Amino acid sequence: MAGKWYPSYPETTGYIIPTFFDYADFSGDNSYRDRAIQMAVWLLSLQLENGAFPGPPWIEPKDGPVVFDTGQIIHGLVRAYEETGDLRFMDAAIHAGDWLVGIQEDDGSWWNYDMDQAHTYNSRTAWALLRIDQANRCNQYYVAAQNNLNWVLSQQTSDGWFFNASFDGNEDPLTHTIAYTIEGLLEAGRLLLDQRFIEAARLSADALRDLQVQGGHLPGKFQSGWQPGVSWSCLTGNAQMAFIWLKLYEMTNETDYLQAATIANQYLKQVQSLSANTLGIRGGVSGSDPIYGDYGSYLYLNWAAKFFADSLMQAEFISGEKQKPAHVE
């Protein structure tokens, strides 16, 4: 695969759409808006009859529905509807939401069609259901989201660590999937005006903030008790946490969050590729640092770049260098 792209990835395309709309506003370059709409139209072509969306084309079954991927695509479809008013995008989001509600477990988790185990990072899927509810009031999404978030709280330990936060239950969770969990709780809590979810997100974000300030960057995995599980760093997780800390700074005005985010962004700037001759690498962010670490080994990931771009734009808004548009969260 050297020098080549993997096949197009529906899940990450879904949550890259809001970043492209945000960057169109940030930069004044409407070509990014056009690209976001093209991505959303492409996703419409992939939706399964039951409303779900397939996972990455390199896993089996290639056309099988996946819970988390469907949730992340909803984020993009709802934003595309909000930006364009095109009902195709909202209709597709609702169809996907109905599927998620229909297969949810009684305890609020999802495990079927999601690697056959429950994952706390589906808090980001619960947040997606609330995004549909925002744009098209429907109590079933509100209830399903609340049920999942309550289940996620049941998986959090007193120091903020989460059980069932890893892709594989036999492995320690990545900083990446822990950050998914935290962001889902935080954003859902903000939409619901529910301090339980916001404080749960802060408990975990604070633990990671303290560790990050000590070391300059976060290890790629954590064992229970927030013990580092590996020596390499997951760059996606660092970017996600920088973005989360900036949001918490905006909410609380506590400068410790701004300090942690600033350190994380400086670290990411140092490891970002800015001099490569290959356009597919220059500007990109690798999976791990060092690049041979176990997450996305020797790969430049579109979602790592997405979360880094989110964090950099948020930092500019906070610094006052750029005016935040009203619709950007």
Image (tube, rainbow, N blue to C red):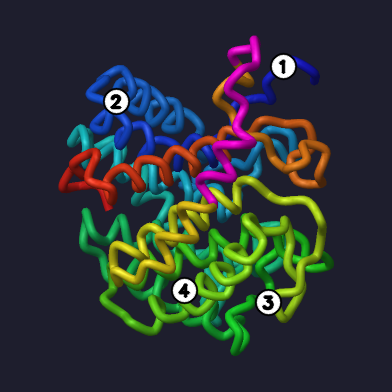
Q: CA distance from mark 4 to mark 1?
A: 37 Å
Identity of the amino acid at label 4?
Ala
**Location of mark 2 (residue):** 33
Query: Neighbour class for label 1 at 10 Å: few (<14), some, many (≥20)?
Result: few
The label shown at residue 71 is: none
Marked residue nearer the N-terminal end (4 or 3): 3
Identity of the amino acid at label 3?
Phe
For image coordinates 39% across by 84% down, the residue present is 196
Marked residue nearer the N-terminal end (1 or 3): 1
Marked residue nearer the N-terminal end (2 or 3): 2
Up the image or down, 102 lies above or below 192; here it is: above
For image coordinates 74% across by 78% down, the residue present is 224
For image coordinates 30% across by 55% down, the residue present is 132
Query: Neighbour class for label 3 at 10 Å: few (<14), some, many (≥20)?
Result: many
Place of residue 123 in the rendered image (x, y in percent of width and height, measured from the top left) = 49, 66
Q: Which residues are magenta?
A: 264-279
Marked residue nearer the N-terminal end (4 or 1): 1
